[in-house]
Structure formats: C-alpha cells, structure tokens
Image (cartoon, grey):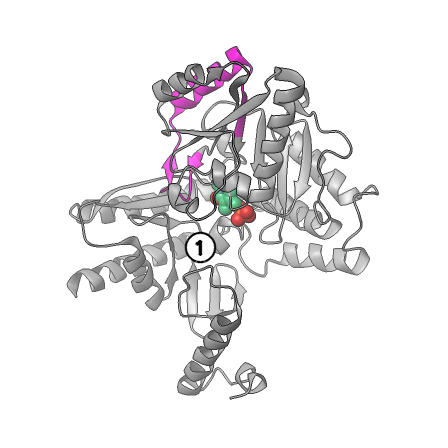
Amino acid sequence: MSPANLMSSPASAPVEADAAASALMTRFDDHVMNTYGRFPIAIARGEGCRLWDTDGREYLDFVAGIATCTLGHAHPALIDAVTQQIQTLHHVSNLYYIPQQGDLAAWIVANSCADRAFFCNSGAEANEAAIKLARKYAHTVQDIDQPVILSAQASFHGRTLATVTATGQPKYHKGFDPLPAGFEYVPYNDIDALEAAVSDIDEGNRRVAAIILEPLQGEGGVNPGDLDYFLRVRKICDETGILLILDEVQVGMGRTGKLWGYENLGIEPDIFTSAKGLAGGIPIGAMACKSFCAVFEPGNHASTFGGNPFACAAALAVARTLEQEDLLNNALARGEQLRKHLRAIAQQSPHLFTEARGWGLMNGLALQPETDLTAIAIVKAALERGLLIVPAGPKVLRFVPPLIVSAAEVDQAAEVLQEAIAAITAS
Ligand SMILES: *Cc1c(COP(=O)(O)O)cnc(C)c1O
C-alpha cells in the first residue's frame, strides 16, 4: 500500500484500518530513530481529556503528554491564543524586544519567588541554563574554581550531557562517557547524607556550589519531597551560600494544586526551572531565579527559539485559564478523589500494591517490589481498555491527567484501572 493510500484509509472500516495503522507504524519504525519503546497505537485527534487513535478508538488520557497538556486537548483558550499569535507574529529573534516574552516573565515574577526569567524550549534546556548560571555564580561570586552540583539519586533532569549527568540514575549514563565533571549524588530525602556530602566535598577550591532537587521526584517513582528535609536543605543553603535549584519541570505550573511544587514544601528556591506544562504542550522552557544570583550578561547564554511570541502566547493563555477555570482547586479536588480510588485499590490488593502517593494531580500507585507484576503490564492492560497511564520506573503507575479533568473522568479512570488489574491478575 502506498503512503498516500494508508493515510486516507477510512477509520469506519475497522479491519482495513487496523492494517493501515500497522502499515503506518512499520513506516514509522523504518524511518524514525529508535529511541522509544512505543505502544502500538497512533494518536490522531484529541479533545479535552479524550484522545482518538487512527482506528477511531477512544482513550481517556491520564498521561497528558507526560504532565504536559495542562488544558487537555484542543482547549479553546489555547487554540485562540496560538491562532491569533501565528496570524500576527510567530517568531522573531531575541535581538529585539518581544512583548509576549516580557508579559510571561512578568507573570512568572508576579506569581513566584523569582525576580527574573530566561526562556528556552524544553526541560533539559531549562536545567542546562540553571547549571550554567550556578557555575557562573560559583566562579564570579562564591569564588569556587571547581564547583560541584549535588543532585539526588533517582532524580531526572533531562537528556543533554550536563542534565543527564545531573540525573542520578546510572542507567541513563551508560554508553555516554566521558560525562561532564562536577556532579555528585546523594540519596533523596536524606538530610544526613546531604550534610556529609557538603562537608566532604571541600578540597581546596572544589566545593558544592549548588544543590538541584525535584520537589517531588517524577520519573524516579512519584516520590514526594519530605517537608523537614527541604526545610533543612534550605537552611544549609542559607548558612553556606550554596544555591538551591528546584526542578519544577514536571510538578510546576499547577500540577500539584499549587502553582509551583515548592509551595508544598514551605520553602523558596534560589533558582527554579519549568517546562512540560508551562505552555500546555507548545514547546517551551523557563529558568527563573532571584536577583542576587541573576549573573548572566549579554553573550553568556542564548536560545534561537527561546521565548518566541508563539510559545509565550501559549503559556500566557495557560496562565490565564488556570485562573479563569480555577484549575488549581480542580487539581486539588480531583487529585484527592483519585488518591481515594488508588488507596482503595491498594488496600484491596495488598499483595500487589504498597501505597498511593502524590500531590494534586501528580500521583503514583506503587507495586509491591516482590510481585512479578510490572507497571508496564498494567499500563498495557489499561490501554487495551481505553485508559492511558504511564509508568514511573518498573514498579510505579503514574497518573498525570490534564488539570481540567472532571470528577466523572476520574471515576471512570479508576473503574477501567480496576478492570485492567482484575484481567491481568486473573490470567
Ligand atoms: C521531563 C523532565 C525533564 C526534561 O524535560 P525535557 O523537556 O524532556 O527536556 C527535566 N526534569 C524533570 C523533572 C522532568 O520531568
């Protein structure tokens, strides 16, 4: 079948369409770099929290592009904003003032602890900017020749060489030596280990310059930060002048029911990064910091696409809609409702699950480490029943629906999840 034919196959003929979908996937696999293990569906369309594949099958989307589609799919506010912006001006160099970028930076500053923002296109780039800023601060203010950045085990900070090195998971480092120097790891939520590392890493001019942490570890298994731990981390940073960088790429922009994840911890970072949900699925990244550490000068750092009118208009539309539709409160209420369901599932099957955990609409259901059951097996069984969820590591199911999710959709997701678990444990 020629590519033109398979693209126009009618979805109303299921058997035909299945063949077309499999041809589409073969064509994809033959040409796209093999960097993802993919599920065998191709998504064609979305609306709200619903997606449809190329065969016309409907899914309830509790992945949201991995915590990215804040307003779900085809939200009128996002459509209006990007349509209007692309008809007016979609891209212009950072050599000139960009009104939408100024508005977005002003919104971030007015609604966070930061005084300044830098824009780029992804989470990795935002963290890369934070790492560069911390290193420049180390050299120019802290008087450290060989700055060390501490990060947590089981963290995730991105896939560029510096951010993958900051990522405290050896599996992501394998095959990419030599990795950049100046990164060390400590266990998450373990203050004694952090204190020990800070005092151990002090040889001549090699010292800890910054600590980068996720307020809640996403990829590492949906592990919420401990309040006491973060209070102590903040205190260490205050006492030593070490910078505290918080990676808000997954938890920021309302996902936890607070605008920023750090608001759940009662502390403020010196630098934080945002990306995934910031523009609701239009590529964007941001690194924001307090003025005392805003040491970048013209020529130090840059991005061709970063903060262009199109992406910033999308982020501003997300920001407005969070407020207009009271989505932080929806994230809190729907999150509580979802955790109730997940806790009930865990209590029903204590041989399979340990606990449900999370904040707002960032939730995980943890499997018993001893069980043969894997997160991916449940994810596949749920997909076959029309529910999209995503693992966070081998033994945790992650639930990150759009922040517009309704009470009925949360109930439906829990129901389908239970059916999926029942079906695979029966077989
Ligand atoms: C997804 C993620 C990143 C990387 O973001 P990209 O946009 O994929 O580069 C960094 N940090 C955290 C916490 C993330 O969840």
Q: Position of residue 360 (x, y in %)?
A: 43, 40
- The extreme front residue here reads 178
At mark 1, the secondary structure is loop
- Towards the viewer: 406 or 137: 137
On screen, residue 230 versus residue 114, left or right, reads left
Which residue corresponds to the image point at 48% horizontal and 38% vertical from the top-left?
165
Q: Residues within 10 Å of mark 1 (few under 14, many from 20)?
A: many
Q: How many marks?
A: 1
- Quarter-wise, where is residue 80 in the image? bottom right
Height in image: 390 above or below 299? below
Q: Which residues are magenta?
A: 216-245
- Towards the viewer: 348 or 97: 97
Height in image: 135 above or below 23? above
Q: Position of residue 219 (x, y in %)?
A: 41, 44
Q: Is residue 237 magenta?
A: yes
The reply to whether residue 339 is in sight is yes
Residue topped by disc 1: 63
The reply to whether residue 249 is in sight is no
Q: Position of residue 178 (x, y in %)?
A: 49, 41
The amino acid type of the residue labelled 1 equals Val
Mark 1 lies within 8 Å of ligand 1 (Cβ measured): no
Which residue corresponds to the image point at 35% horizontal and 57% vertical from the top-left?
413
Which residue corresponds to the image point at 41% horizontal and 81% vertical from the top-left?
18
- Towards the viewer: 358 or 168: 168
Height in image: 290 above or below 307? above
- The extreme right residue here reads 96
- Towards the viewer: 325 or 180: 180
Quarter of the figure that contains the C terminus? bottom left
Q: Position of residue 100 (x, y in %)?
A: 75, 44
Which residue corresponds to the image point at 38% horizontal and 56% vertical from the top-left?
389
